[in-house]
């Protein structure tokens, strides 16, 4: 069960809040729909419930708020909008990555893909999926953790009639097994057709909370839809005749050449038009929406079944969307009373009856849900290392960045060797003095920025913390994986540059210098430091571009400041630090260890190295502060 209490979003400048003091319940084993026109606050209400945006109020999922649930993906499955995945990732790769995020075995991904009918498309890219297949994949991702509750935002929008029937059948089967389903829609006929309970929102406020049968009776009314070039004249004639005959007829102009006639029939309207010589282009019975204010009341407790609900009429000359309303003899329990015939939104049978093949079944045997997940006592729902490796290797972006860095670095090294006057260390690193960073450092920074930037562009983790949950374990793993990628990139860059220089100019340009060990440590520290800056900057600024821009800005903006601070005595002090440490330390270290330490200190004493170190400290503090702020919020 879901209990939403006092949901209120933050005011938008001088505008009222998008959601204002909304409270409702969604019982287990039933489908509850939030109904409202676009802009009524449906999506905002869902985001407030899932703690994806700040506001007031609280939502209990089986008695607990989402932030206190240890395994949120096993409690709530979420589908907001399209599937938020990288378009170049395969269906199987995306689902397996989410298995690591949900803490479930890999075989669970194959089970949910089979349940939604996507086994044959598991090698397809997300960017090539149709709208219907995309929604199937979104439902599969929501079912990965075997949640008790499904929260979906307009899941059938843009789907065909067949996909619509399938999705509603899947949700019905899920609810029949005891699950809680909360969905949104802008179509009142869909709400009456597919839901057990309808919660109506209008301008951010709750205006009705009622069973589907009461909603159908108070919100939907049969009407005659008329399209004629003489709409104004026909409207006046129908109103005049109704007054003369003292009949309760209401005529509403729908704009242009369309009118809606309530309280009459196609035969009566057609006879009036014929007597006065009015041409009619369309004349059809349909069910009309009376608007959110019609029957705006809140039902508290059981409601008596409706004995006189209007029934769906028959189209006369042109098909028009119809919606079945409940018949007499519904059960006494309002939760068990739902319309018997649920027609797809765009289906209107010619004879006015719903065939068995067009109904969404209460429990279709052909619709199979994935088996339950065996609950295991794991310390956390996320497997960070497994998730990060699958995220990084699931798309070819990282490999393309590596190849581009190697090509640019090798060509730059050859060009610098031809120009001359470049020291050998800078020549092997392909680092001209005119550039703030070598290509390898920029590439490592880009790979680091992608590690967190993709989380915000294509959110994949648990919905309770937004795009990227700020977990210390996840940050640590991202830094480790970024370090490994930067290390490989740094070694390959030096190797490719040296090999190409040897082929073009001979061995004189690639002789190993005497101080190769401290130089190597300084080089690796610079590349790995840039990768870390990219990871932290993308996590703080929530953007890959911002992360890469921070990497490039470090030597340009922070470097001059560090240069001023390290001029003079501090540089000499850093250079003599290893010797002084040997004099004051009783236990002598190894010669290689001292050389590594000397290389690290030399890098710190350099403006670029010091700027990278200072930027890392500032970004780490900013990341931790934003994490604490999000938790407090």
Image (spheres, rainbow, N blue to C red):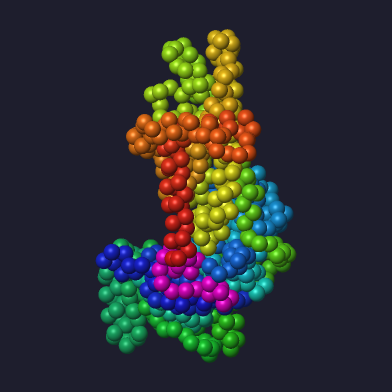
Q: Quadrant of the C terminus?
A: bottom left
Magenta stretch: residue 593 in it?
no
Q: Position of residue 199 (x, y in %)?
A: 47, 76
Q: Position of residue 364 (x, y in %)?
A: 68, 68
Nearest the viewer among 529 and 514 is 514
Name the residue: 51% across, 56% down.
470
Name the residue: 70% across, 65% down.
377
Nearest the viewer among 464 and 477 is 477
Q: Quadrant of residue 28?
A: bottom right
Nearest the viewer among 492 and 386 is 492
Span highlighted in magenta in the image: 45-65
Q: Is residue 185 above or below residue 542?
A: below
Residue 612 visible somewhere in the drawing = yes
Name the residue: 35% across, 86% down.
247
Residue 222 visible somewhere in the drawing = no
Q: Is residue 267 above or below residue 403?
A: below
């Amino acid at each position: 069960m879901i209990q939403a209490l006092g949901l209120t979003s933050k005011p938008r400048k001088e505008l009222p809040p998008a959601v204002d003091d909304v409270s409702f319940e969604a019982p287990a084993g039933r489908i509850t729909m939030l109904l409202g026109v676009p802009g009524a606050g449906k999506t905002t209400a869902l985001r407030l419930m899932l703690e994806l945006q700040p506001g007031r109020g609280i939502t209990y999922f089986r008695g607990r708020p989402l932030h206190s649930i240890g395994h949120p993906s096993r409690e709530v499955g979420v589908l907001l909008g399209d599937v938020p995945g990288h378009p170049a990732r395969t269906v199987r790769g995306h689902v397996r990555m989410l298995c690591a995020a949900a803490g479930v075995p890999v075989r669970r991904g194959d089970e949910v893909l089979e349940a939604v009918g996507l086994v044959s498309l598991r090698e397809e890219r997300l960017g090539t999926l149709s709208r219907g297949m995309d929604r199937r994949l979104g439902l599969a991702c929501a079912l990965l953790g075997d949640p008790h509750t499904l929260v979906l935002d307009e899941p059938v929008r843009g789907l065909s009639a067949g996909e619509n029937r399938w999705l509603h059948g899947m949700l019905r089967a899920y609810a029949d097994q005891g699950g809680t389903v909360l969905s949104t829609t802008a179509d009142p006929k869909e709400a009456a057709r597919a839901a057990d309970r309808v919660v109506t929102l209008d301008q951010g406020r709750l205006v009705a909370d009622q069973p589907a049968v009461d909603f159908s009776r108070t919100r939907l009314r049969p009407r005659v839809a008329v399209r004629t070039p003489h709409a104004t004249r026909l409207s006046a004639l129908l109103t005049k005749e109704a007054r003369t005959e003292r009949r309760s007829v209401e005529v509403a102009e729908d704009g242009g050449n369309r009118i809606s006639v309530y309280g009459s029939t196609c035969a009566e309207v057609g006879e009036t038009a014929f007597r006065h010589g009015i041409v009619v282009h369309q004349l059809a019975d349909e069910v009309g929406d009376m608007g959110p204010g019609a029957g705006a009341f809140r039902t508290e407790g059981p409601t008596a079944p409706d004995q006189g609900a209007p029934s769906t009429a028959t189209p006369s000359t042109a098909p028009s969307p119809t919606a079945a309303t409940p018949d007499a003899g519904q059960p006494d329990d309002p939760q068990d009373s739902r319309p018997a015939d649920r027609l797809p939104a765009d289906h209107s049978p010619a004879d006015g009856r719903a065939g068995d093949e067009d109904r969404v079944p209460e429990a279709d045997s052909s619709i199979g849900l994935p088996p339950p997940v065996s609950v295991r006592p794991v310390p956390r729902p996320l497997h960070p290392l497994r998730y990060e490796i699958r995220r990084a290797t699931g798309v070819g972006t990282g490999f393309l960045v590596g190849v581009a860095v190697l090509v640019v670095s090798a060509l730059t090294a050859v060009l610098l060797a031809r120009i001359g006057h470049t020291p050998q260390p800078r020549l092997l690193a392909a680092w001209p003095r005119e550039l703030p960073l070598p290509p390898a450092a920029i590439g490592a920074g880009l790979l680091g920025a992608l590690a967190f930037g993709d989380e915000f562009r294509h959110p994949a983790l648990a919905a309770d913390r937004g795009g990227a949950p700020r977990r210390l374990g996840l940050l640590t793993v991202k830094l480790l994986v970024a370090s490994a990628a930067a290390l490989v990139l740094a070694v390959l860059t030096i190797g490719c540059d040296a090999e190409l220089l040897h082929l073009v100019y001979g061995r004189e340009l690639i002789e190993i210098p005497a101080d190769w060990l401290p130089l190597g440590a300084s080089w690796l520290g610079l590349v790995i430091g840039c990768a870390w800056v990219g990871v932290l900057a993308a996590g703080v600024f929530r953007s890959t571009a911002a992360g890469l821009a921070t990497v490039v800005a470090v030597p340009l903006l922070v470097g001059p400041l560090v240069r001023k601070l390290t001029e003079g005595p501090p540089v000499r002090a850093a250079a003599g630090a290893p010797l002084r440490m040997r004099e004051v330390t009783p236990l002598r270290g190894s010669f290689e260890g001292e050389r590594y330490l000397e290389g690290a200190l030399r890098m710190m004493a350099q403006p670029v190295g010091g700027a990278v170190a200072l930027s890392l400290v500032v970004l780490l503090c900013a990341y931790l502060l934003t994490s604490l702020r999000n938790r407090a919020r």
